[in-house]
Image: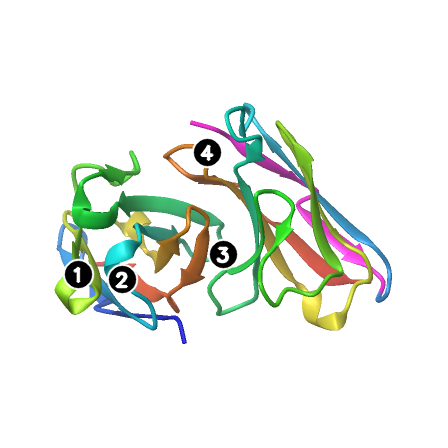
Amino acid sequence: DIVMTQSPDSLAVSLGERATINCKSSQSILYSSNNYNYLVWYQQKPGQPPKLLIYWASTRAAGVPDRFSGSGSGTDFTLTISSLQAEDVAIYYCQQYYYIPYTFGQGTKLEIK
Amino acid sequence: ELQLVGSGGGLVKPGESLRVSCEASGFTFANFAMNWVRQAPGQGLEWVAYISKSSTDIYYADSMKGRITISRDDARNSLHLQMNSLRVEDTAVYFCARELPWLDTWGQGIQVTVSS
């Protein structure tokens, strides 16, 4: 199975500042035949299902504010929130869909400093 | 509006069975693979099961393999998860999710509690 490891486990950032969350996969999730990274980022708020933010490692889902961006390739990935808003307080998860079993990172809890 | 509405959760005793379901609307259900993902209290997300279009391919997480069966009824736009021999550690919120191949649309979650 592919192990997904996020860092840090928790993060406190001031409003308007940048937040960076990292995700590392235990093996490459870059599919060479199409050059796509099979990585997605979700945001989850208490009592809600996960919400899709980013897919193919760097493509923003419809309706997601442009302060959210994804980067990285191969085994190392980053989710960046360029200017933290109060409504961004949540737990963020990365997930690989390179092959089954799909696996998630352990989550990063983002709070306001 | 894309929607997945879950049902069938509840409180059961260890060793008992439960079937949870998800009804889809707002899209052509038969055209999409579907998944179940669960979340134990205060924990992260764990993928549980996958079913392809037309049910040709089915996969299960090792943690539940042999105890669960995923199925779909395209005529009724419904996804099901039959869970047998439930354990205390199966207590979780169970989410159904549409696959694109990323999971783009999620149900609201179905609470399953296994306790004596």
Are labels 4 and 3 assigned to the same chain?
no
Q: Residue at x 37, y 35 (%)?
A: A101
The quadrant holding residue B58 is top left
> x%, y% of residue A111?
73, 61
Few, some or many residues within 10 Å of mark 1 (<14, 14–19, 20+): some
Few, some or many residues within 10 Å of mark 4 (<14, 14–19, 20+): some
Are labels 2 and 1 assigned to the same chain?
yes
Examine the rendering and report whether any part of residue A22 can be seen: yes
Q: The residue under label 4 is which amino acid type?
A: Tyr
Q: Which mark is residue B42?
A: 3
The quadrant holding residue A16 is bottom right
Disc 1 to disc 4, C-alpha distance: 26 Å
Q: Which residue is mark 4?
A: A98
| SS type, badge 2 | helix
Compared with B20, A77 (above or below) is above
Q: Chain of mark 2?
A: B
Compared with B47, B7 (above or below) is below
Q: Which mark is residue B74?
A: 1
Q: Chain of mark 3?
A: B
Few, some or many residues within 10 Å of mark 2 (<14, 14–19, 20+): many
Q: The residue under label 2 is which amino acid type?
A: Phe
Indicate whether residue A9 is drawn in magenta: yes
Instruction: Give whichever of discs 2 and 3 has the lower sequence position.
Output: 2
Indicate whether residue A68 is drawn in magenta: no
- The residue mark sitting in front, 2 or 3, is 2
Q: Chain of mark 1?
A: B
Q: Which mark is residue B29?
A: 2
Check contact, mark 4 vs mark 3: CB within 8 A.
no
Q: The residue under label 3 is which amino acid type?
A: Gly
Instruction: Give whichever of discs 1 and 3 has the lower sequence position.
Output: 3
Observer-nearest of B58 and B41: B58
